[in-house]
Image (cartoon, grey):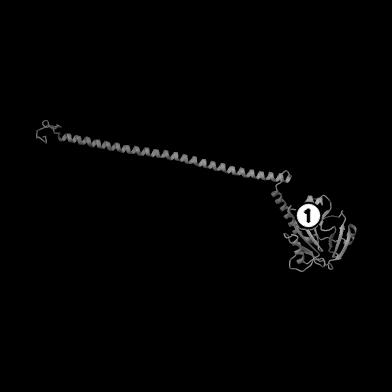
Amino acid sequence: MFCKKCGTQLGDDAKFCKKCGTPTSITKKSNDNKQESTIDGDADFGEKESLESSYNSQKKSRKEKKVEKKIKKKAKKSQWSKGKIIRRFFVRLILLLIMVLLITVLLNYLGVIQIPIINSLMTNIGVEKELTEIEEVDVDSLKIEHPDADAYYKKNTEIISEISAKKSNEVQTEKELMSSVESRGFTKYPISSEYSIDGEYYTATNITNDSSDKHPIYQTYYQSSSNDLWTIFIINGAVIANPVTYNMQSKLGVQLLISESETITSYDSATNKFYKTIPNESEVIIKVVNRIDTETLDKLTIGVIDGL
């Protein structure tokens, strides 16, 4: 083997020229092999590092997912717990309000406290029920045999006068009667009649303001500002008020009526006559007022009636 630079003959295993020091092909090959080995090693190391990095990344990703899952689970549990607490709060609040309302109504009923709104509501319900019952009564089922009117009035009253319904000039037509009653303020409930001027009975019928028909007796209702129920009768032109609520609670043992005079006008359908009488107090108690209208009845509470 010869040196490529100076041409000096060298041994086959010489790595450098002994004359000029130039490396031989053996050294170059050795260096190339070493470089290739180094490159291969670096490649193996890089691949290994890449695999380790990928593994660590996947491991880290799994851990993060577990942590994230735990956080979401805790958040969901916390949210459900808050919702449960809120629901419990509202349920307890509603139960408390219901309990307070029931206690208030009970104390109001027992008279320990007075709540005007509750009193008004309960009274209105009672009044409407009374009126409904009155309207739904089957009058035909209540028919009874009439007693002898002449004998009754002679025994229990002082008879002032008596007159045939057909001959009386005081009987008003439906139109006249409606105008008169409305002028007294009785406009909420209809006015009805049950007898013709001939004394013929029929089911209670509401009158109209354009009819000239006459009836011996008319009636309507009134609920006062204190929620007391009244029945208003117009008999041969005379107005009489029956304090229904008062009489239902009264301990007098007899009916009490409000009149515009000391006399009471009654109607007997059997004889078709009017009787103007002064009843015995054992039969009917009469309380006199100047005028029967809504203003007067609003003032006639139970206590006021007792003081008349």
Kindly indicate the quadrant of the structure image that contains residue 162.
bottom right
Kindly indicate the quadrant of the structure image that contains residue 24.
top left
Residue at the location (34% across, 38% down)? 51
Q: Which of 130 and 54 is in front in this view?
A: 130
Q: Nearer the viewer, residue 271 or 295?
A: 295
Does 26 sit above or below residue 87?
Answer: above
Q: Nearer the viewer, residue 155 or 26?
A: 155
Residue 304 drawn at (x, y percent): 79, 51
Q: How many neighbours does mark 1 have within 10 angstroms: few (below 14), some (14-19), or many (20 or more)?
A: some
Residue 86 drawn at (x, y percent): 57, 43
Mark 1, residue position:
244
Residue at the location (47% across, 40% down)? 71
In this rendering, would 197 be left or right of 40? right
Residue at the location (60% across, 44% down)? 91
Does 271 sit above or below residue 64?
Answer: below
Residue 165 drawn at (x, y percent): 84, 66
Q: Which of 306 and 89 is in front in this view?
A: 306
